[in-house]
Amino acid sequence: MSDTILVTNNLTKKYGDKLAVDSASISIRKGAIFGLIGMNGAGKTTIMKMISGMVKPTSGDYDYTGFDCKKEDAFSRIGALIEAPAIYPNMSAYDNMKMKCLAYGINSKEYIEEKLKLVGLGYTGKKKAGKFSLGMKQRLGIALALVGDPDFLLLDEPINGLDPQGIVEVREMLLKLSQEKGVTILISSHILEELSKIATDYAIIGNGRIIEQISQQELLSKCKDKIVIKSDSTSAIIPVLDRIGVTDYELVDSKTIYVYNKNEEVNRINKEIAMADILVDSIGVATSDIEEYFLETTSKGAGTANNEPKEEASK
């Protein structure tokens, strides 16, 4: 059986003449907490709807390589909270859970109470779900998604509406599910700073396109201190960096090079470039935080996709 749980191949979705998702290809490994990061309307929810079977792709495909069964059977091993939680407003949290459990053949008070306690709703008693705050409804949606103990959990903006304490509680819950239960989790969000506290891998999406798939370790590496070289002659600078043993660098665009080597000195690099008679516009040390990296990456990846249908306009 594969070490990956899901692979998508050029997933594309059109709504009329609007291109919501454009050739999205990602690979999610088992046990990962995978963050699907993008601005509102980038295509996150549409991707989740396609891989959960809610929406049929216009073209492309996906394969649950981690499940030794047909795609249709794999859906029974997936829990999902996509868009607004499907709850009965005139029922309590317990009764909402009971309805979902009965559909799964589960008739256990202890099972329901365990799931409600896990999401911080063990105290709500007979209070009707329609009277819940937005954050409480989100937590109930997560609890409902956990019915059946899924191997793969899809959560669309799960911290929306949560207060700071609620965000911490959801974060700890997801870490527990991943580390103790081995659940693979796919989370969509537009808040990279918060997601970076738990995610092991990311895919950054903009205008319906996957711009980059990157691990947590790679992301942290790219957000550390770096030397930024600005020049019209980057193609001539690269051989100089190679000659003096600078290996950890990136050609960001035709006029910008990032050097990530921690111990490299700006003065030494500047001197070697000058000795090669190459003009630079500027050279210096800069630090990017995670949000800056996200904004920079999405701006570079901005394209022509026409984006979201009405139901995802707020995502």
Image (cartoon, rainbow, N blue to C red):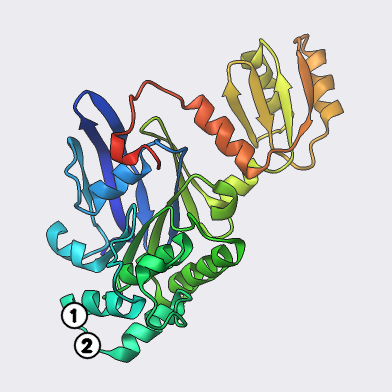
Is 62 drawn above or below residue 42 in the view shown? below
- Residue 77 lies, in percent from the top left, at 24, 68
Mark 1, residue position? 102
Marks 1/2 in contact by CB < 8 Å: the verdict is yes
Quarter residue 60 falls in:
top left
Q: Is residue 31 visible?
A: no
- Residue 101 lies, in percent from the top left, at 23, 78
User: Which of the image's four quarters has the C terminus?
Assistant: top left
Quarter residue 224 falls in:
top right
Q: Label 1 sits on what residue type?
A: Leu
Q: Nearer the viewer, residue 307 or 184?
A: 307
Is 22 drawn above or below residue 217 in the view shown? above
- Residue 216 lies, in percent from the top left, at 55, 52
| Disc number placed over residue 107 in the picture, else none | 2
Tell me the residue at 32%/64% (across/down).
152
Residue at disc 2, secondary structure: loop
10 Å neighbourhood of mark 1: few (<14), some, or many (≥20)? few
User: Which of the image's four quarters has the N terminus?
Assistant: bottom left
Q: CA distance from mark 1 to mark 2?
A: 6 Å
Tell me the residue at 25%/80% (across/down).
98
| Disc number placed over residue 65 in the picture, else none | none
Q: Label 2 sits on what residue type?
A: Asn
10 Å neighbourhood of mark 2: few (<14), some, or many (≥20)? few
Q: Nearer the viewer, residue 102 or 8?
A: 102
Q: Is residue 78 left or right of residue 184?
A: left
Residue at disc 1, secondary structure: helix
